[in-house]
Image: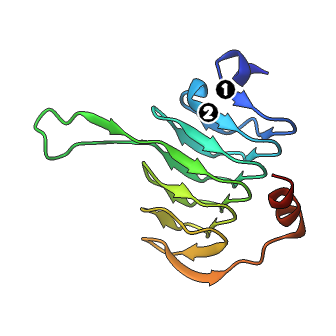
Amino acid sequence: MLLRCFGARLGRNCHIYPKCRIWAPWNLRCGDGAAIADEVVVYNPADVSLGVHAIVSQQAYLCTATHDYDNSDFPMISAPISLEDFAWVCARASVLPGVTLREGAVLGLAAVATRDLDAWYVYAGNPAKRVKERRRPLRALATAEAG
């Protein structure tokens, strides 16, 4: 309820755990059943969007801003982050500004997403590299057919 008071748009049955830190709730959108675990940091001067059943696990870091280090004034620059339906950011992983995790993409433990991740693949490492294909769960198939 508190996040909604500050402008967050949350779908039904979202699970936003009390020890996560959301810098700008008005820039957060979560689809039905999305989850943000304890100790997640959502630094979001730009929009962060989580699709249906998207998950951000404990101690992950979603960062929508950086600085232009080539400019002597060091201005902040930002770009949105999007986790599509059934995407998962595993524990201690980081997502950089402007990155989209396509439907069902998994960013593994402590991995760093520096560019968009393809749908239904698992990524690991720094920078994250595609390591294997992910099976689509029946719930995702049913959602795709209904939509």
Q: Residue at x 54, y 50 (%)?
A: 61
Callout 1: helix, strand or loop? Answer: loop
Relative side of 44 to 70, left or right: right
| First reached walking from the N terminus: tag 1 or tag 2 | 1
Q: Residue at x 71, y 15 (%)?
A: 5
Q: Residue at x 61, y 70 (%)?
A: 108
Residue 34 at x, y percent in the picture:
76, 46
141 versus 100 height, above or below: below
Residue topped by disc 2: 28
Residue topped by disc 1: 8
The answer to whether mark 1 and mark 2 are in CB contact below 8 A is: yes
Residue 15 at x, y percent in the picture:
81, 41
Quadrant in which the N terminus is drawn: top right
Would you call the spot at circle 2 few (<14 residues within 10 Å), some (14-19), or many (20 or more)? many
**What amino acid type should be assigned to the residue bearing mark 1?**
Ala
Would you call the spot at circle 1 few (<14 residues within 10 Å), some (14-19), or many (20 or more)? some
**What amino acid type should be assigned to the residue bearing mark 2?**
Leu
Residue 115: image quadrant is: bottom left
Relative side of 26 to 35, left or right: left
Residue 120 at x, y percent in the picture:
67, 71
Residue 62 at x, y percent in the picture:
53, 48
Distance from the alpha carbon under mark 1 to that under mark 2 = 5 Å
Residue in front for this viewpoint, 33 or 3: 33
Relative side of 34 to 116, left or right: right
Residue in front for this viewpoint, 23 or 145: 145
